[in-house]
Image (cartoon, rainbow, N blue to C red):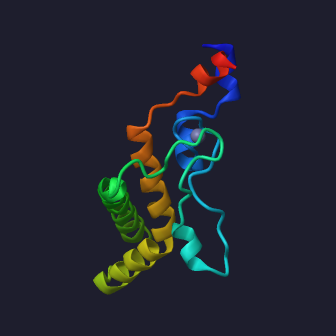
Amino acid sequence: MNTDSTSFPSLWKSLFGMYCPKCRKGKLFQPIQWGRPSSFFEMRKNCENCSQSFEPEPGFYFGAMFISYALNTVLFIAVWVAYSTLVEEFSILELLLLIGMSALLLLPVFFRLSRSIWITIFVPFQGKNQSANS
Ligand SMILES: [Zn+2]
């Protein structure tokens, strides 16, 4: 392994920490303001570190819906398995309520995570090249 690889966050840390995929240093999203729930969904326009655009083209994040769909499917299955192993008397209404509540609670997380995954697919990491030039 290259020694300077330690100075950059790993791909997973960048994905789940929601960092710029190009430099892995700038944040993708605005800081969360707890008094203003819409702040959960506010993305920065550009990277504060490398000025990579976070919306390379209009409708760029349309495809992130499919990532979100996959994440929700995993959540539904996880809740279903957990519920059916932990609860003796199976109630479809309770299960649906649990799934609905957990999906609602995780909506901001899945929104951010699916966008982070989506932009990381299309914008390659160039951090190491930048450090070599400077
Ligand atoms: Zn950046």
Residue 40, by quadrant, is: bottom right
Residue 10 shown left or right of residue 88 in the figure: right
Residue 113 shown left or right of residue 39 in the figure: left
Asked if residue 6 is positioned above or below residue 48 in the image, the reply reads above
Q: In what quadrant does ligand 1 lie?
A: top right
Where, quadrant-wise, is the N terminus in this rendering?
Answer: top right
Where residue 45 appears, x then y in whole percent? 53, 55
For the image, the number of numbered tags is 0
Nearer to me, 120 or 46 = 46
The answer to whether one can see residue 11 in this image is yes
Residue 120, by quadrant, is: top left
Looking at the image, which residue sits at the far bottom?
93
- At 51% across and 63% down in the image, what residue appears? 109
Asked if residue 111 is positioned above or below residue 17 in the image, the reply reads below
- At 32% across and 58% down in the image, what residue appears? 59
Where residue 57 appears, x then y in whole percent? 36, 51
Where residue 83 appears, x then y in whole percent? 40, 71
Where residue 48 appears, x then y in whole percent? 64, 47
- At 55% across and 50% down in the image, what residue appears? 46
Where, quadrant-wise, is the C terminus in this rendering?
Answer: top right
The answer to whether one can see residue 87 in this image is no
- At 49% across and 47% down in the image, what residue appears? 53
